[in-house]
C-alpha cells in the first residue's frame, strides 16, 4: 500500500492482482465518490485498446463517452499537442495568440457556421449557449429583461453545473443541489406538439440533444427534429443543438442534425473536439447570435488557449477528410447488424446511429452494472447507462474484427 502510494508507476509492469486493488483503494480514499467506475485501472492506451496496470488489454467500447472518437493517442493529435507544447501553451485572453483565430475559422468552416466561442468543458459550452440565448432574447427579440425562458427535453443530459442540473429530470443529478435556476420548461423528448405548447413570447431558445446519449442513445421519431426547427422558426426562437456527444462523426455525419437536414442556430461541441487529449469545447453559430457578446461579458481563463486550439485544429483536419464520418457510417451499419442478431437472445432493443448504440438488456437479464463487469472480465470495456442499457460507442478507428469481439462478448454476457 505504501509502495503504491509513494510510487504508483513502479508497480505498473506485471504488478500482480494487488496492483489494481491498490489503485482502486487510493481512489476510494482520496477521490470524492461521485463516480462508480469499473475496477479496471488503465495505465496505457493506443487506438481502440487500453492496457491495465497488470498488463491485461481491453477493447475500448466506450471511447470516453465519445471524447475518444479518433482513438487513444491518435498520432496526428499527439504530434499537434507535442509541437504546441514546445511553443506556447497559455496566454490568457488578455493577449492574442497565433492559434485562436485559425482554430475558430477552421471550426466555423467545418461546421458551416460564422463564429466560435471557445470554452473548455461541455457543461461550460452549454452554460455559454444559455447565456448567449438569453442575451439574444433581450437585445434582439425584445423579451422583457429577466423573463426569458428556454425549453428543454425530459431525460436530457447537458452537464453538471447548478444551472444545468436545474432542468435535469434525473433525481440523482438534482437532489440536494437546489435552489435551482429558474427559466426552463421541460417537455417530453420526441413530442413536437408538447414542445410547441411550451413556447411563449418569452421563449429564447429550445435546447436539445438530437440523440439523447446519457438517456440510453435515444433517437427521436422521424421528422421530429425538422418539426422542432419549424416551430422555432415560426416563433422566432433559437434552436440550440447540444452535439457534445452526438457530434464530430459519432453518428456517421459531422453533426447528428445533418441526418435530418436540419441546421441549428447554435451548436455546443465538446468531448471529441479535444481529441481525447485535453478538454476543448465551443459554441458555434451565426454572427447574428454569437455577436451579442461584448468584452467583459463572458469568458474563461483557459478557453481558447494555444494548446487547446492547436489540438482542436488537428481534430478539425481529421474531420475535414470525412474519413471518420465514413467509418462510423459503414462500421456503424455493421455494428447495428450484429447487435440486431441479439434481439430475443438477451437483448430487447438496440437504438442508435453510426458507431453508437444503446443496447437494452431484456428484463430479467443481468443488470447493466453486472453486464459491464462481466464484459470487463472478457476484455471489453463499456458502461451501462440507466439501469439496463449498455452504451456502446467505440473509437471510430475500430475494425470489423474488433467489433465482432465486442459483440460476441455482449452476446455471452446478456444470454444468461
Ligand atoms: C458530456 C456531455 C455534456 C457535458 O460535458 P462535460 O465535458 O462533461 O462537462 C453536455 N452535453 C452532452 C450531450 C454530453 O454528452
Image: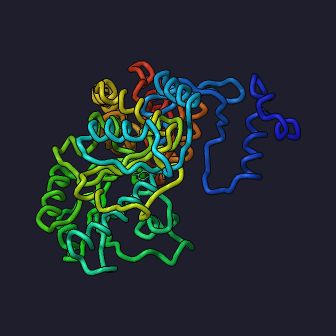
Q: How many marks?
A: 0
Q: Please report the residue visible at 55 percent of the width from the left and 24 percent of the height from the top.
A: 46
Query: Residue 34, image x and y in percent?
Result: 62, 57
Instruction: Decide if residue 205 is on the left or right side of residue 413.
Output: left
Query: Residue 73, image x and y in percent?
Result: 53, 27
Q: Nearer the viewer, residue 62 or 406?
A: 62
Instruction: Decide if residue 390 is on the left or right side of residue 193.
Output: right
Q: Please report the residue visible at 18 percent of the width from the left and 59 percent of the height from the top.
A: 228
Query: Residue 113, image x and y in percent?
Result: 25, 45
Please say if 115 is above or below 233. above
Image quarter for residue 15?
top right
Residue 218 showing in the rendered view: no
Residue 221 showing in the rendered view: yes
Image quarter for residue 375?
top right
Please say if 119 is above or below 416. below
Q: Please report the residue visible at 30 percent of the width from the left and 80 percent of the height from the top.
A: 145
Quarter of the image that includes the N terminus: top right
Instruction: Decide if residue 245 is on the left or right side of residue 21.
Output: left
Query: Residue 90, image x and y in percent?
Result: 56, 42
Instruction: Decide if residue 145 is on the left or right side of residue 87.
Output: left
Q: Nearer the viewer, residue 48 or 58?
A: 48
Furthest residue to the top? 401
Furthest residue to the front? 95
Furthest residue to the right? 2
Q: Nearer the viewer, residue 110 or 164?
A: 110
Amino acid at each position: 500500500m505504501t509502495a503504491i502510494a509513494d510510487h504508483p508507476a513502479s508497480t505498473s509492469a506485471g504488478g500482480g492482482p494487488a496492483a489494481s486493488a491498490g489503485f482502486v483503494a487510493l481512489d476510494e480514499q482520496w477521490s470524492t465518490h461521485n463516480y462508480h467506475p469499473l475496477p479496471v485501472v488503465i495505465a496505457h492506451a493506443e487506438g481502440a485498446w487500453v492496457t491495465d496496470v497488470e498488463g491485461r488489454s481491453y477493447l475500448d467500447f466506450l471511447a470516453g463517452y465519445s471524447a475518444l472518437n479518433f482513438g487513444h493517442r491518435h498520432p496526428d493529435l499527439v504530434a499537434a499537442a507535442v509541437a504546441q507544447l514546445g511553443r506556447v501553451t497559455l496566454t490568457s485572453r488578455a493577449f492574442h495568440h497565433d492559434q485562436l483565430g485559425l482554430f475558430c475559422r477552421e471550426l466555423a468552416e467545418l461546421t458551416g457556421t460564422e463564429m466560435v466561442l471557445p470554452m473548455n468543458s461541455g457543461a461550460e459550452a452549454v452554460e455559454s449557449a444559455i447565456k448567449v440565448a438569453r442575451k439574444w432574447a433581450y437585445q434582439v427579440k425584445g423579451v422583457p429583461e429577466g423573463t426569458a425562458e428556454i425549453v428543454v427535453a425530459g431525460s436530457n443530459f447537458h452537464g453538471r453545473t447548478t444551472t444545468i442540473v436545474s432542468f435535469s429530470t434525473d433525481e440523482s443529478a438534482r437532489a440536494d443541489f437546489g435552489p435551482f435556476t429558474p427559466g426552463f420548461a421541460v417537455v417530453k423528448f420526441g413530442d413536437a406538439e408538447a414542445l410547441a405548447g411550451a413556447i411563449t413570447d418569452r421563449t429564447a431558445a429550445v435546447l436539445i440533444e438530437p440523440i439523447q446519449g446519457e438517456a440510453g442513445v435515444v433517437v427521436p421519431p422521424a421528422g421530429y427534429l425538422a418539426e422542432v426547427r419549424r416551430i422555432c422558426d415560426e416563433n422566432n426562437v433559437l434552436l440550440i443543438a447540444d452535439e457534445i456527444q452526438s457530434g464530430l462523426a459519432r453518428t456517421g455525419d459531422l453533426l447528428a442534425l445533418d441526418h435530418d437536414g436540419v441546421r441549428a442556430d447554435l451548436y455546443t461541441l465538446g468531448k471529441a473536439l479535444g481529441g481525447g487529449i485535453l478538454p476543448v469545447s465551443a459554441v458555434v453559430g451565426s454572427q447574428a447570435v454569437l455577436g451579442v457578446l461584448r468584452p467583459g461579458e463572458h469568458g474563461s481563463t483557459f478557453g481558447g488557449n494555444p494548446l487547446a486550439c492547436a489540438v482542436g485544429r488537428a481534430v478539425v483536419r481529421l474531420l475535414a477528410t470525412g474519413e471518420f464520418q465514413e467509418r462510423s457510417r459503414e462500421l456503424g451499419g455493421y455494428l447495428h447488424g450484429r447487435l440486431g442478431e441479439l434481439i430475443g437472445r438477451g437483448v430487447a432493443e438496440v437504438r442508435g446511429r453510426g458507431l453508437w448504440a444503446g443496447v437494452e438488456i431484456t428484463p430479467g437479464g443481468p443488470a447493466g452494472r453486472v453486464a459491464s463487469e462481466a464484459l470487463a472480465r472478457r476484455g471489453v470495456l463499456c458502461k451501462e447507462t440507466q439501469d439496463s442499457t449498455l452504451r456502446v460507442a467505440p473509437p471510430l478507428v475500430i475494425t470489423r474484427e474488433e467489433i465482432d469481439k465486442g459483440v460476441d462478448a455482449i452476446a455471452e454476457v446478456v444470454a444468461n
